[in-house]
Amino acid sequence: MKKVITKIFLMLWVCSLSWTSWGKSQHIILTASQGTGSYIFANELSRLWASSAGIIKSQLVIRTEISAENRLTQLTNNRVSLAIIDAKTAHEKLKKFTGVRVLSLLWNNWLYILGTVPGSYLSLDSTQTLLVHDNSLHFAQVWKKLSPRTEISWFNGSSIPDFMGGFSEEVMAFTGPAPLDEINNWLEHFAGIRLLSLEQRLIQSLKLEYPWLRHKKISANTFSYQTEALSAVAWNPVLVTSADFPDKLAVTLLNLMFSQKEALNPHFLFNNLVRKDNITFRRIYPFHSAAKTVFLFK
């Protein structure tokens, strides 16, 4: 009886191996935890990948890994095919992983400043209170060096203020993609608050301290009542792979990503992909050969 059971298990094991070999091959992409931008982007990319079955004959499987550096390690050890990392990690760690290549910069994450202060600029000299999201620690650290007397309060994803009693601090700072419905809701419901531009002194200090930040402008009319372009800083998550990731598949993947702007209702993160962002970083990051072909630089 034992011999019969053993044979059955062996047959099932062989069948499972055959199913894996007969089925589609898998490419694993590593992201941060569920709910983060990288996970949301990868989830939509996986859906688009699956819908392109006639072009890409494989599956894209998402796995989460909290540590961005561990994502690079797994990529280097050929345990995964792709990973999304933050700009800080890309600037500080990519050089240590010689086999890793950049496929593309992704969407822009903007530093948003909402305030009740007079004028259109955030003022280092007159602002006394700040409410800062945990994801904008870099901003708070630079601000504290320049204006140590400012009182800073904190919030995060589990303690987002509703401002039902009014706008509590003069200025609120947080980081996110564009557009964000929450910003329009606040602008619509609370009189006197507006999106503010960063003054040049603060921008230069932020870039000097954190070179992964870039000075960019939020285009006019991106948000309600925002009739002028705003000076801001932004950073891009980075999609990375190994140097030997197949060129043909990489080109197909990049074309799939950047063609979404032409879709009827593109996902907002894909709608925020900008080809020129890659050209800006062509001498900073080691790009995959396919990326150089798609973005037309050497």
Image: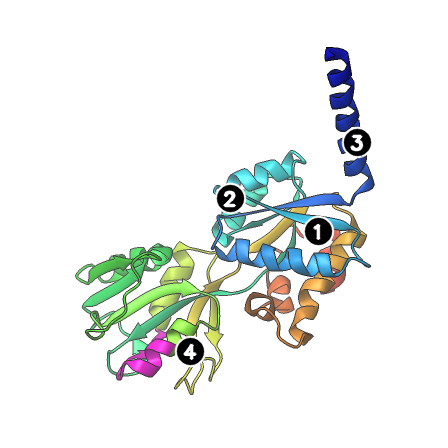
| Residue found 22% across the figure and 60% down from its top | 152
Distance from the alpha carbon under mark 2 to that under mark 4: 31 Å
Q: Specify start and end residues of the magenta stretch as a single range.
A: 185-198
Residue in front for this viewpoint, 249 or 147: 249
Q: Amino acid at mark 4?
A: Leu
Q: Amino acid at mark 2?
A: Ala
Q: Nearer the viewer, mark 3 or mark 1?
A: 3
Disc 1 secondary structure class: loop
Disc 3 secondary structure class: helix
Q: Nearer the viewer, mark 3 or mark 2?
A: 3
Disc 2 secondary structure class: helix
Task: Find out whether the residues at labels 2 and 4 contact each other: C-beta distance under 8 Å.
Answer: no
Which residue is label 1 attached to?
Answer: 288
For residue 114, above or below residue 84? below
Distance from the alpha carbon under mark 2 to that under mark 1: 19 Å
Which residue is label 2 attached to?
Answer: 68
- Looking at the rendered structure, which numbered label has been put on residue 15? 3
Residue in front for this viewpoint, 49 or 68: 49
